[in-house]
Amino acid sequence: MEAWVTQAAPRSSTKLSRVYWLTVALFVGLQIADVITTNHALTIPGIWEANPLMAWAQAELGAAWWLPKRKRRFCTTGVVAQ
């Protein structure tokens, strides 16, 4: 049984790298879509942000409300990826 384990083919770092970057690209794309759809929804009368922390950021930062949110997400992604 040990001989079988030692002769296993090594993982392809190229394949792993490709999956990693596709996942990162998907994550970034979804984050951008989140900002766009949130901004669009907030233009509709009667719609408001349900998250109190984000509502505060929107009130204090105006159009740049999403900057702290993205900074936190990308920092979290960097920590998880390592």
Image (tube, helix red, strand yellow):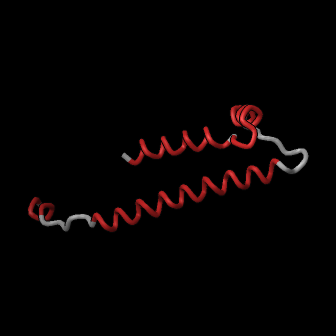
Farthest-out residue, right: 45
Residue at 39%, 66% (x, y): give it: 18
- Marker count (numbered): 0
In the displayed structure image, the side of residue 78 where residue 12 appears, left or right: left
Residue at 47%, 60% (x, y): give it: 23
Q: Is residue 60 above or below residue 3?
A: above
* Quarter containing the N terminus: bottom left
Residue at 60%, 57% (x, y): give it: 30
Farthest-out residue, left: 3
Residue at 63%, 55% (x, y): give it: 32
User: In the image, residue 56 lies at what x, y percent?
Assistant: 73, 31
In the displayed structure image, the side of residue 28 where residue 43 appears, left or right: right
User: In the image, residue 10 lies at what x, y percent?
Assistant: 21, 65
Q: Is residue 18 above or below residue 64?
A: below
In the displayed structure image, the side of residue 3 where residue 35 appears, left or right: right
In the displayed structure image, the side of residue 13 where residue 23 appears, left or right: right
User: In the image, residue 42 lies at what x, y percent?
Assistant: 81, 47
User: In the image, residue 64 lies at what x, y percent?
Assistant: 69, 42
* Quarter containing the C terminus: top left
